[in-house]
Image: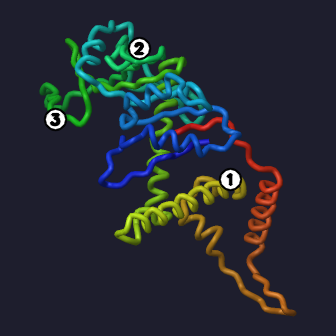
């Protein structure tokens, strides 16, 4: 199960009180959830959040395994420069068929201990993973200008690289960790798009905070109910469809209302009748046997 615990508007920074929101989200999880994972972009690179997860301060879940994009500081760059060429390993990704495809990026484990780790009150393990990607010179052959670029860079004697970092407390292979961390990309933004466009989350009705908060809560409820319906009741071809497609193929179906013998009936095409019959049967099965949740992944 993937838990999205983000609420953001234009005036609130992405990292605003993330630990508080994270704890509140954990408290709302049902008793059937027994383990939680966390992955985040650099907005989650906050000392209190990292320490809370790594030191196991949560009474219910203990140590929470995470992978979070880290800040590339000047000190981190210096440690990366000390790495030998043999330290770097190629990053592979899987295609839809499960085959490994070589990318133009490399990763390496970095021996980096920031001050906040050294000053921590409890023993906790942190790993820093560096990711680099060679920057291709332009066709004119001029030297790459790294000033004012929207991402950090690093140079050696031969090449210029884009440089990124991930902090984690997970004890798995670096390439596997990077792919797991990157799985958050796309889906979260896709859900934000669903919220804003499909379910009117981006069209708040009032200039009053309370009214807009109620509107937002209704939208979140609609999002969860719709997703639950897709997962447990709809046919496979509808499980990843947007609301517009569901509206035309499931909800907004043409039919004839018939009043006869003190009964009201709806006459639809045979295809839709079978579809609705299948949906009702699956819903009744869910009601009789509730869905059990295992691990939760917070993204």
Residue at left 57%, top 64%?
245
Query: Which one is nearer the viewer's eye here, 141 or 230?
Result: 230
The residue that disc 3 covers is 148
Callout 1 environment at 10 Å: few (<14), some (14 to 19), or many (20+)?
few
Q: Position of residue 76 (x, y in %)?
A: 29, 18
Left or right, 16 with respect to 4, comes to left
> Which residue is under mark 2?
109
Q: Which mark is residue 251?
A: none
Of callouts 3 and 1, which one flags the residue occurring earlier in the amino acid sequence? 3
- Pair 2/1: label in front: 2
Q: Which residue is mark 1?
A: 236
Q: Are marks 3 and 1 in contact (CB under 8 Å)?
A: no
Q: Earlier in the sequence, mark 2 or mark 1?
A: 2
Q: Which of the 4 image quarters holds residue 20?
A: top left
Residue at x-position 28% and y-position 8%: 82
User: Which element type, helix, strand or loop, lies under badge 1?
Assistant: helix
Q: Looking at the picture, tell me which residue is in the foreground, 66 or 142.
A: 66
Foreground residue, 103 or 279? 279
């Amino acid at each position: 199960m993937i838990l999205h615990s983000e609420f953001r508007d234009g005036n609130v920074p992405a990292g605003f009180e993330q630990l508080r929101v994270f704890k509140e989200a954990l408290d709302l999880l049902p008793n059937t959830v027994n383990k939680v994972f966390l992955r985040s972009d650099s907005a989650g690179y906050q000392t209190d959040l990292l320490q809370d997860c790594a030191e196991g301060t949560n009474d219910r879940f203990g140590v929470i395994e995470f992978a979070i994009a880290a800040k590339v500081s000047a000190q981190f760059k210096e440690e990366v420069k000390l790495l030998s060429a043999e330290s770097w390993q190629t990053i592979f990704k899987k295609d839809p068929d499960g085959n490994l495809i070589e990318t133009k990026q490399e990763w390496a484990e970095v021996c980096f201990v920031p001050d906040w780790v050294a000053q921590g009150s409890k023993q906790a393990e942190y790993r820093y993973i560096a990711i680099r990607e060679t920057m291709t010179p332009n066709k004119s052959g001029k030297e790459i200008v790294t000033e004012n670029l929207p991402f950090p860079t690093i140079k050696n004697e031969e090449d210029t690289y884009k440089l990124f970092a991930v902090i984690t407390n997970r004890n798995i292979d670096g390439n596997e960790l990077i792919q797991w961390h990157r799985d958050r990309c796309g889906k979260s933004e896709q859900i934000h798009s669903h919220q804003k466009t499909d379910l009117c989350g981006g069209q708040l009705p009032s200039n009053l905070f309370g009214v807009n908060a109620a509107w937002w809560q209704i939208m979140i409820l609609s999002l969860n109910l719709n997703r639950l319906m897709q997962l447990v009741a709809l046919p496979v071809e509808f499980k990843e469809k947007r609301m517009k497609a569901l509206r035309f193929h499931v909800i907004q179906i043409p039919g004839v209302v018939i009043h006869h013998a003190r009964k009201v009936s709806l006459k639809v095409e045979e295809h839709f009748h079978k579809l609705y019959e299948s949906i009702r049967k699956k819903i009744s099965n869910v009601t009789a046997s509730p869905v059990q949740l295992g691990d939760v992944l917070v993204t």
